[in-house]
Image (tube, rainbow, N blue to C red):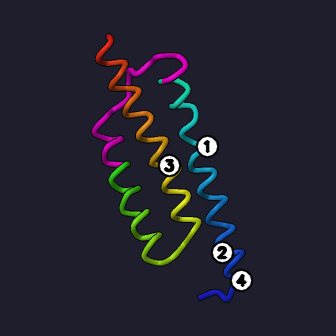
Amino acid sequence: MIDMDPLLIESIGIVAGILGVIAWLPQLRRVWKENKHEGISLPTFWLVASALSLWLIYGFLIGSLAMIFANIAALGCILALIIGVNRLRREG
């Protein structure tokens, strides 16, 4: 294992988490601003939400603030997408 400063390791995790959340912003914009939901697979989003939930639990178990915050933020994005898509599909 590479010997690195724990703060540097957590910083890498925080940057990765921020990038992971930014990656969801175009989808959120498409659903919430443009009111478009075509091509979005809810089963896939539920699977991603399940995986993120497990990563969140893992983050708590190992005590990684980067993993905890990143997965909470990503889960928030996924749940907002699921809610938005459900809303649009009920209206349409």
Q: Mark 1 sits on what residue?
A: 22
* Mark 2 in CB contact with mark 4 (< 8 angstroms): yes
Q: Mark 2 sits on what residue?
A: 9
Q: How many marks?
A: 4
Of tags 2 and 3, the one toward the viewer is 3
| Quarter of the figure that contains the C terminus | top left
Sequence-earlier tag: 4 or 1 = 4
Residue 52 relative to residue 6: left or right: left
Q: Mark 4 sits on what residue?
A: 5
Mark 2: amino acid: Ile
Within the image, what quadrant is residue 26 found in? top right
Mark 1: amino acid: Ile
Sequence-earlier tag: 1 or 2 = 2
Secondary structure of the residue carrying numbered label 1: helix
Q: In the rendering, at what x and y percent does residue 45 appear?
A: 36, 41
Q: Mark 3 sits on what residue?
A: 74
Secondary structure of the residue carrying numbered label 2: helix
| Residue at point 31%, 48% (across, down) | 47
Answer whether residue 43 is magenta in the image: yes
